[in-house]
Every structure is written in C-alpha cells, then in structure tokens.
Amino acid sequence: MPTMQPALAVPAIPDPMDAPALRWGILGPGGIANTFASAAREGTRSSVVAVGSRSRDRASVFARRHGIARAYGSYEELVADDEVDAVYIASPHSEHHEHALLALHAGKPVLVEKAFTRNIAETEEILTTAERAGLLAAEAMWSRYLPHYDVVRRTVQDGTLGEVVRISADHGQLLWPDGPQRLADPALAGGALLDLGVYPVAFVDHVLGGLRDVRATGTLSAQGVDITVGMTARAESDVPALMSCTMAAADATAAAVIGTRARIELSSRFYEPSTTVRLIAPDGAALDEYHPDPVHGFRFQIAEIARAVSEGRGEPWSVPWEATRRVMGILDEVRRQVGVRYPGE
Ligand SMILES: NC(=O)c1ccc[n+]([C@@H]2O[C@H](COP(=O)([O-])OP(=O)(O)OC[C@H]3O[C@@H](n4cnc5c(N)ncnc54)[C@H](OP(=O)(O)O)[C@@H]3O)[C@@H](O)[C@H]2O)c1
C-alpha cells in the first residue's frame, strides 16, 4: 500500500456569511475602527449602526465614510443606544478597561481590541464584570479567529509534525520614532510589546497553549516604553518558545513550528491571511501549502462574536477567557522583567 504524504489539516472555521447578524456600535473611530467597519459591511451579515467619539465631528465624519446611521459625541450616548447589540472597543490600550466596563455596565457585550488591557488586573475586572452580568467579553486578537491559525493548530494536534521541539514567532514593524504617537506614549500604554509582541505570544498560545516561565530582555525609549523585546517561554509539553517584537525595524514577521517529522513555516505576516502556511519535510521537501483568502480578515472575528452572542456564550471558542488571561499574564511578566511601568499602575 502506498504511504500517504503528510498534509496540513483542513480548517473548521465556518463561513462568516453564515453567522447571524449583529448590530454593532464602534467606540473610538480611529485607524483600526475603519478596518472593522469595512469588514463588517462587506464580509458579514452584521452591520455597524452607531459610532461614538469624544468629538461629535469625528463621529460624524466616520459615520459618513462608512454609511453608519447614528454618530454620537460621547461614549456614554453610544452605549445607551438600544439598537446597539454589541460594542467594539477600538480606543488605545490604556483606555480599554474603562471603556469596556462602561459598555458592560450599560448591558452591552464587548469585543475589545488587543492588547486586551494594560495588565492582568484590568483584564480580571472586565471578565468578572462580564461573567456577573452574563455578557460576552472577547479579545479582538483577530488572527486567532482566522482559518489559517486553525490549520496550524489542527496540524500540530494531529501529530503530523511528530514531536514538536520548538515554536517561534517574530513581529517587527517600523513604527517608531516617527510612527503613531500612541506607540511612544507611556500614558497610552505604548511600546512594542502590547501592540506587536502580543501577536507572537498569542500565536504560541493558540497553537500549543499553556504558556509559562517567560524570560525577557529588551531596550526602552527615553520615555520608558519598550522598543525591542526578546522573549523565551515554555509552552504545553515544555516546548521552548522563542518570540520577539520591535517597533524600530521591519522584520520578516515569520513564525515556525518545528517537529521531528515535519515543520510548519509562515514566512511572512504570519498573523495575517495574506500569509502562506507551508508544511515542509526534514529534508526540505515541500509537502503541502495552505493559502488563506486574504480579503477582510476581520470578518472572522465579527462573525464568531455574532455566533457567541446569539447562543448566549460569554466567550468565543477561538479566544477563551483563559487564553486572554494567559497572554496578559505573560505580557505583565515581560514588562516587569524589561522594566516598563505605565503611569497609574
Ligand atoms: N487588530 C489590529 O490589526 C490592530 C491594528 C492597529 C491597532 N489595533 C489596536 O486598536 C486599538 C486602537 O488603535 P488605533 O491604531 O486604531 O489607534 P488610533 O488610530 O489612535 O485610534 C484610537 C481612537 O481611540 C479614541 N480615544 C479614546 N481615548 C483616547 C485617548 N486617551 N487618546 C487617544 N485616543 C483616544 C480616539 O477617538 P475619539 O477621540 O474620536 O473618540 C482615537 O481615534 C489599540 O488597542 C491597538 O492595539 C489593532
């Protein structure tokens, strides 16, 4: 009998267009809120029905751009809107805690941008509040909702790689010192780790789980935010994990899972659906490839949250609360080791 060539697993993420419709409110109409609004409109059955800004003018401009019915000049008005089913929190990390609690106290489920909060204490308060209120609170680590992350995780779980001996992920983008001010500002919980480093940490956690025992070293700016961080940790089954981030240079943003029988490589933009997942034999032979659909990656998280809310679940399957807790715990410990503290912590 011929032996079957090892292959990548098939993803089991449903079509976003099959998810129920949810009426969203966007809190904080900045850069990433545009991506969310376009993906909801063009890639799901959900819609953005309202937007809230600290400025009515900014809310109105955003609403016009995306065809949104209602524009509010305060976040309080947004969360009080009876026709908003769920709120997408798209403010800077430093504000997620306050804004998520504002929405939860108004009875709205929340999808909170990454990093979920500044620290684990703020995360716990949001999750406890959501649990008590019977409402969903979810981390918008959009990559974890994507089919190609499911391909990687399932392929590892199937044993196709043999014994996993190492996992790695790096995320470098040139965003400092001339990029968005948000990243340079300690008061807005700036730095590479919470914006970029959260991706390698979440990737490792998604594929293997159980992240612990992190060791980190890094360089800081004069203002006291991290510019570059190198990290090692142990994932499930004591597999060594190597992770890094920098906002001072662009790197390949590659990730790999290395096993005794085969390895998986995502050689660029591992966290985006523009990447390719490659399964490679120990001798370098190409065994299989998975090419994600690169259009509107955010549609998968929007659809999964709509499913969770309609089924009365408090957390999405792709990013359960325990995963958010593990990731935030690692980020806290990394910041402690590299010496980054935000004002008011
Ligand atoms: N998933 C992704 O691919 C991705 C990519 C980029 C960023 N993000 C995340 O999304 C969040 C927002 O990032 P962004 O790049 O969209 O930021 P941004 O362009 O600066 O937008 C943030 C918005 O938050 C509002 N805001 C509320 N309080 C604020 C404060 N104290 N200072 C500044 N703005 C404040 C502002 O809107 P108003 O003042 O008009 O209310 C602002 O437009 C961050 O957590 C970031 O990590 C995710």
Image (cartoon, rainbow, N blue to C red):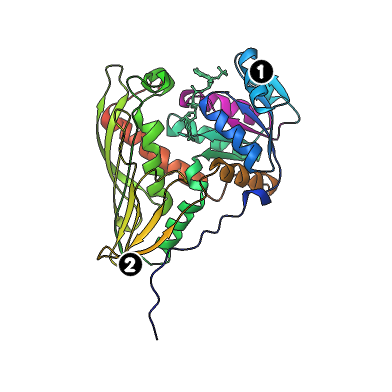
Residue 87 location (% of width, % of height): 63, 32
Q: Nearer the viewer, residue 114 or 170?
A: 170
Residue 57 location (% of width, % of height): 63, 13
Q: Nearer the viewer, mark 1 or mark 2?
A: 1
Q: Mark 1 touching mark 2, by CB under 8 A?
A: no
Q: Report helix, strand or loop for mark 2.
A: loop
Name which residue lies at 33% across and 58% down.
237
Q: Nearer the viewer, residue 186 or 168?
A: 168
Name which residue lies at 27% across and 40% down.
231
Q: Residues within 10 Å of mark 1 (few under 14, many from 20)?
A: many
Residue 152 appears in which quarter of the rendering?
A: bottom left
Task: Specify whether residue 319 is in view.
Answer: no
Q: Residues within 10 Å of mark 2 (few under 14, many from 20)?
A: some
Marked residue nearer the N-terminal end (1 or 2): 1
**Farthest residue, direction bottom:** 1
Residue corresponding to mark 1? 60
Residue 121 location (% of width, % of height): 45, 32
Q: Nearer the viewer, residue 333 or 276?
A: 276
Which quarter of the figure is the N terminus placed in?
Answer: bottom left
| Magenta-colored stretch includes residue 96 | yes
Residue corresponding to mark 2? 162
Residue 99 appears in which quarter of the rendering?
A: top right
Magenta-tinted stretch: 84-107
Q: Is 125 rendered above or below residue 309?
A: above
24 on left or right of 321:
right
| Magenta-colored stretch includes residue 318 | no
226 on left or right of 136:
left
Ligand 1 within 8 A of label 1's CB? Answer: no
Name which residue lies at 66% across and 23% down.
63
The CA span between labels 1 and 2 is: 55 Å
